[in-house]
Image (cartoon, grey):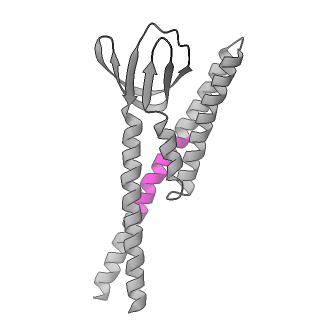
Amino acid sequence: MKNIDMTLESIDIRKIHRFRILLKIVGIYELIVGLFGVVLLGFDFDAHKYVSFSSLILFLIVGGYFLFSLYAGFKLFFETENKIRLSFITQYFQIPLILTANFGYMLYVGAFALIRIVDTGLNFKFGFSCYYIISMISQSKEFFIGINLFPILIIILLKLTNDKLKSAIVKNKSFEESIIER
């Protein structure tokens, strides 16, 4: 009976370890894409000869987002269970895609899977890039509305992994308590 109990304990510990590794992988991804965004934004800022006040504000907002993504990835990597909300926030900002003549919002860095409704119907686009538009006067002739599916997949992965991790931790604690009571 004791060998069976020890086997159950080691299985739960392995599960906990695997779930933590999966969260750490997402943390590494967020660190990489946050750094990628900061570097590309730096190149973009450097390429402008003249920077208007509105461009500077845009660079500060987008740069702040990329730095926040770096921070969220760092926290998820080193403090997996406690800082998952920060990763949710970074992913939520990448979901909506809107471009009209009066307004534009699109912000993604890293892998993307875009589904957009455009003039001609549905448009799909996949890849790895850094792109941002935040504008109250986009002056665009193009119109689309859509979503980025990749952050939704990451949110689902984070949620499921975090729930399973918490469940495995609770099972492990109750197992330890049952051994102490014996």
The C terminus: image quadrant: bottom left
Q: Residue at x 45, y 14 (%)?
A: 100
Q: Position of residue 154 (x, y in %)?
A: 40, 43
Judged left or right of residue 86, residue 21 is: left
129 is higher (above) or lower (below) than 162: above
156 or 137, which lies in front?
137
Rendered image quadrant of residue 78: bottom right
The N terminus: image quadrant: bottom left
59 or 34, which lies in front?
59
Q: Residue at x 57, y 31 (%)?
A: 37
Q: Which residues are magenta?
A: 17-31
Q: Residue at x 56, y 40 (%)?
A: 69
52 is higher (above) or lower (below) than 170: above
33 or 172, which lies in front?
172
Q: Position of residue 156 (x, y in %)?
A: 36, 46
The residue most toward the bottom is: 182
Judged left or right of residue 176, residue 69 is: right
Taking the magenta stretch, the answer to whether it contains residue 179 is no
